[in-house]
Image: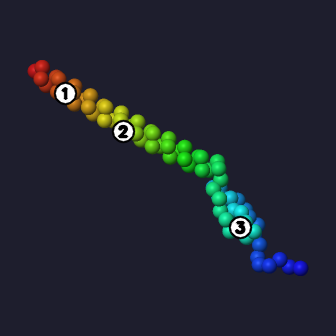
Amino acid sequence: HQPTGPKCSCGSYSIYSPSGERCEHLGIRLGAFFGILFGALAATLLLGVGTFLILQNCRNSRRWYTISDSEK
C-alpha cells in the first residue's frame, strides 16, 4: 500500500524547525528566539547608553565654554 501524497524529509534550518507530516509547519527554535530577543535588547541598551553619554558630553562642553566666557 502506497502512502497518499508526497512526503518530505524535514531538514532543519538555522532558525526554523519544520514539523508536520509534509513539513507544513515552521516553528522558531527556542535558542534562536532568545538570541534574537536578547541581542535586540542589548543593542537597544547600548544605543541608549551611547546617546546618553553623547548628550552628557555635549551639555558639559557647553557649560565649560559658558563659564570660561563669562569670566573674561
Q: How does the figure colour the protein chain or chains?
A: rainbow
| Residue 65 badge | 1
Give the secondary structure at mark 2. Answer: helix
Task: Name the residue rendered at 77%, 78% in the picture.
Answer: 5
> Depth-wise, is mark 1 or mark 2 nearer the camera?
2
| Residue 23 badge | 3
The residue nearer to you, when weighing 66 against 3, is 3
Residue closest to the far left: 72
Q: Earlier in the sequence, mark 2 or mark 3?
A: 3
Q: Earlier in the sequence, mark 1 or mark 2?
A: 2
Q: In this image, 10 relative to 50: left or right?
A: right
Q: In this image, 16 relative to 10: left or right?
A: left
Q: CA distance from mark 2 to mark 3?
A: 45 Å
The part of the image, by quadrant, that contains residue 23 is bottom right
The residue nearer to you, when weighing 40 against 3, is 3
Q: CA distance from mark 1 to mark 2?
A: 21 Å
Task: Name the residue rendered at 22%, 25% in the picture.
Answer: 64
The part of the image, by quadrant, that contains residue 20 is bottom right
Q: In this image, 53 relative to 21: left or right?
A: left
Q: Are marks 1 and 2 in contact (CB under 8 Å)?
A: no
Percent x, y for residue 57?
Answer: 30, 31
Residue marked by disc 2:
51
Q: CA distance from mark 3 to mark 1?
A: 66 Å
Residue type at numbered disc 3: Cys
Crowding at mark 2 (Cα within 10 Å: few <14, some 14-19, many 20+): few
Residue type at numbered disc 2: Thr
Q: Is residue 43 above or below residue 68?
A: below
Q: In this image, 16 relative to 37: left or right?
A: right
